[in-house]
Image (tube, helix red, strand yellow):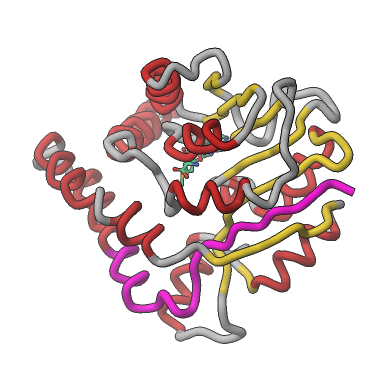
Amino acid sequence: MSNDLKSIHDFDFTMICNYFKLLERQGPGSPEVTQKAVSFINELSDEAKIADIGCGTGGQTMVLANYTKGQITGIDLFPDFIEIFNRNAANTHCENRLKGIVGSMDNLPFQNEELDLIWSEGAIYNIGFERGMNEWNRFLKKDGFIAVTEASWFTPERPAEIEDFWLANYPEIDTIPTKIAQMEKAGYTLTAHFILPENCWTEHFYAPQFPAQEAFLKEYSGNAAAADLIAGQRHEQSLYDKYKEYYGYVFYIGQKR
Ligand code: SAM
């Protein structure tokens, strides 16, 4: 019984990966926004150590590498994403600075105070913003930087439909002042924060999904779970179109005290 459950579970993950690996990035963001976030961070040396946590296939990591010095370790739970990450690093001749490894953000393979910079776009929600901010703190050197994007409410109140959607999917979504207070409490001084522009969702995240969805549905033709996955993605996008004034991603950049 448990073996059956495990195989169903594994299949779902494989299927989800097979969809998201068709995309250059697995969450909202853009090269411009990654560059803007880097601009708030003190210049790093060639010896700097950087971790990109929940890196996916590394769309943002390749940009990060262009605007920083030092060694970058990308970490993701899914081996297929890491394989693409390392292939992209080799194709862009960055393999001596960029290394993708399989691992989990709740069990990071770093020493205390080893890192100069922790990066994480659209991924900290997997363990929760507050937990991630607290648990990752020890890996940063004093005065080291953290830069993450996180789903946040833009208004104190929202229509019930979007509130219910987020509370069912990520109840830790909260207002920007609350996120900043959580970050400060976890031992960082806020350096900057800014809302990701709409094109991070529309142009860079949803638009590339149209052809990917067609290809994926063809590959998984007749598979109900695959159809559900795509229906879920389309629903999420329609909610964004309808309610984007109420929520979005915010880049939070802080320095360890
Ligand atoms: N940072 C990438 C981007 O912006 O395109 C990927 C963002 S995607 C929304 C979230 C990523 O977190 C996925 O690649 C997923 O595999 C990864 N992930 C989920 N749980 C994880 C965990 N426990 N440890 C490491 N990575 C995880």
Q: Is residue 47 left or right of residue 142?
A: left
- Residue 175 seen in this snapshot: yes
Name the residue nearer the viewer: 205 or 157: 205
Q: Is residue 172 left or right of residue 207?
A: right
65 in relation to 122, above or below: above
The percent coordinates of residue 240 (x first, y second) are: 36, 70
Q: Which residue occupies 68% across, 52% down?
A: 40
Name the residue nearer the viewer: 46 or 168: 46
Which quarter of the image is occupied by the N terminus? top left
Name the residue nearer the viewer: 176 or 230: 176
The percent coordinates of residue 101 (x first, y second) are: 55, 20
Q: Is residue 56 left or right of residue 132?
A: left
Please provide the residue range marked out in magenta.
235-257
Q: Which residue occupies 59% across, 43% down?
A: 120
Q: Which residue occupies 28% across, 49% down?
A: 229
43 in relation to 169, above or below: above
